[in-house]
Image (cartoon, rainbow, N blue to C red):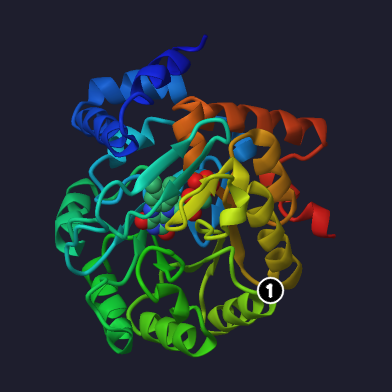
Amino acid sequence: MSVYKKLRSVLFKLDPENAHYLAEIFLKSVSTSSVLQEILANQFCYENEILHNQICGLDFYNPIGLAAGFDKNATMVRGLCALGFGFLEVGTLTKHAQNGNPKPRLFRYLQEESLQNAMGFNNQGALKAAARLAQIYPYTLPIGINLGKNKSIPTQDALKNYEEVLCDFLSLGDYYVFNLSSPNTPNLRDLQNVSFVKELFMMAREHTNKPIFLKISPDMPKDTMLSVCEQAILCQASGIIATNTSVDYTLLWGTRDFGGISGAVLKSKSAEVFESLAKAFFGQTILIAAGGIDDAQEAYKRIKMGASLVQVYTGLIFKGPALCKQINQEIAQYLQRDGFLNLRDAIGVDLK
Ligand SMILES: Cc1cc2nc3c(=O)[nH]c(=O)nc-3n(C[C@H](O)[C@H](O)[C@H](O)COP(=O)(O)O)c2cc1C
């Protein structure tokens, strides 16, 4: 049994949110100790030139990132850097601190290697996170800041709320993500429409030329998804992250009917959405794949389908901190096997 499997059998006896809290305490303390960072980095980081890429002017030493939601308050950045990720996305952060939805709001499905969460953007607010990030800026890896709307802000004021939260991080993000796709803030997903997306990116481009991505839900009808993404690209989005969690409760037997589903059961749905997106927009914009990616095979598949980068979250919970290294090592082997000199050459080959 691997070390993580033993640790997991203890962690999984805890309520999922408490287990996350313990992991946060550990990674926070790693973040303050360069000795611990070095020990973890020796164990978990994998360096191979074949994986290097430059995207939107940022240097990625590998294509595997941590998806938003794990480090909501940017408390663990340095500790997470030592786990071998090529980039990290912190948040979702909102302008004002908020508690999120009542607990319990995070559930594990062990057999299915999946999670269901209804967190509701629990976070300490933009200013606290910005102060933390300012202490470690510039970063050793590209750090994205995922931005959301406060629950208390009515839809008609959403644009201003996004503008305020973006402005709190203008000097601190390597890239930004507009999250309109969480199922856990009432009516947020309604903002995934052409007119709001146009206003949002036009507003953002008045403030920054840095990369900005739109993160989409896997639950939109295909035509709507394509027109919303097209609008974002027209208004100078740097790319699209597909996907967030799903509210398709048929994915998971015995599930609760609230919150979003992630992990292995989301894999094929997310991959399907990603494929439609890539067929429409590969070459015109940068595509980042998320949703059920928990091994090198799936990561490589999405890269060949057009993903410049991929993100993991639920896979990390079930498979542990060696996941990133394992995926990167295997992708490097696949690239060599398939005759690619660099990861860059494999991106989108299955679309050609
Ligand atoms: C507990 C939990 C919290 C999440 N919180 C956020 C969030 O705050 N913002 C966001 O954009 N996505 C959030 N996500 C979605 C993930 O970033 C990711 O898009 C989704 O889980 C699919 O990837 P996965 O199957 O690898 O987990 C969250 C996911 C989980 C499981």
Figure quadrant of residue 186: bottom left
Residue sitting at 69 percent across and 71 percent down?
281
Q: Can residue 59 be spotted in the picture?
A: no
Closer-to-camera residue (224/171) = 224
Q: Is residue 80 above or below residue 270?
A: above
> Image check: 236 left or right of 21?
right
Callout 1: SS: helix
Q: Residues within 10 Å of mark 1 (few under 14, many from 20)?
A: few
Residue type for callout 1: Lys
Q: Is residue 108 above or below residue 157?
A: above
* The CB of the residue at mark 1 lies under 8 Å from ligand 1: no
In the rendered image, the residue lying farthest to the right is 352
Closer-to-camera residue (126/352) = 126
Q: Position of residue 11 (x, y in %)?
A: 35, 24
In the rendered image, the residue lying farthest to the top is 1
Residue sitting at 59 percent across and 76 percent down?
229
Closer-to-camera residue (289/204) = 289
Residue sitting at 74 percent across and 49 percent down?
304
Q: Position of residue 188 (x, y in %)?
A: 40, 74
Q: Is residue 307 above or below residue 158?
A: above
Q: Position of residue 343 (x, y in %)?
A: 68, 44
Q: Position of residue 85 (x, y in %)?
A: 46, 38
Give the quadrant of the C terminus.
bottom right
**Total marks in image:** 1
Q: Is residue 238 above or below residue 308?
A: below
> Image check: 327 left or right of 70?
right
Figure quadrant of residue 239: bottom right
Residue placed under numbered mark 1 in the picture:
222
> Image check: 149 left or right of 61?
left
Q: Can residue 81 be spotted in the picture?
A: yes
Residue sitting at 82 percent across and 36 percent down?
338
